[in-house]
Image (tube, helix red, strand yellow):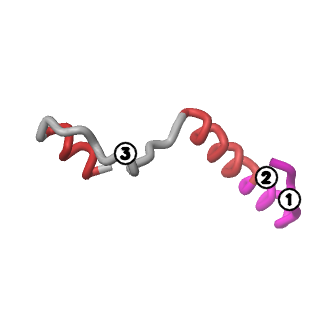
Amino acid sequence: MAAAIRAHEEGKDPDPAVLFPSVQDGVKGMAFVVAAVESSAAGGTWVPL
């Protein structure tokens, strides 16, 4: 992330290998957190994602 910001500040294109998370990635991450909290509240049982 820092390298992409630095490239922008220098007027250059960021390295194409730098990937940024999408909204969909964020939604999947939040679903995982919710499942982890539910699992913990249920004594560590498996819960579906």
Q: Amino acid at mark 2?
A: Glu
Q: Are marks 2 and 3 in contact (CB under 8 Å)?
A: no
Residue 46 location in percent, x, y? 87, 61
Q: Nearer the viewer, residue 26 or 3?
A: 3
The boundaries of the magenta stretch are: 36-49
For mark 1, give the secondary structure. loop
Distance from disc 2 to disc 3, alpha carbons, whole Å, reads: 38 Å
Residue 38: which numbered mark, if any?
2
Residue 42: which numbered mark, if any?
1
Distance from disc 3 to disc 1, alpha carbons, whole Å, reads: 43 Å
Numbered marks: total: 3
Q: Amino acid at mark 1?
A: Ala
Q: In the displayed structure, does residue 10 sit left or right of residue 19? A: left
Residue 28 location in percent, x, y? 66, 43
Question: Which residue matches tag 3?
Answer: 16
Q: Nearer the viewer, residue 26 or 1?
A: 1
Distance from disc 2 to disc 1, alpha carbons, whole Å, reads: 6 Å
Report which quarter residue 24 is drawn in. top right
Residue 48 location in percent, x, y? 86, 50
For mark 2, give the secondary structure. helix
Residue 18: which numbered mark, if any?
none
Is residue 31 on the magenta stretch? no
Q: What residue appears at the point 44 percent right and 46 percent down from the top-left corner?
A: 19
Q: Nearer the viewer, residue 33 or 11?
A: 11
Q: Amino acid at mark 3?
A: Pro
For mark 3, give the secondary structure. loop
Q: Are marks 3 and 1 in contact (CB under 8 Å)?
A: no
Q: In the displayed structure, does residue 46 sit left or right of residue 35? A: right
Is residue 41 on the magenta stretch? yes
Q: What residue appears at the point 50 percent right and 42 percent down from the top-left corner?
A: 21
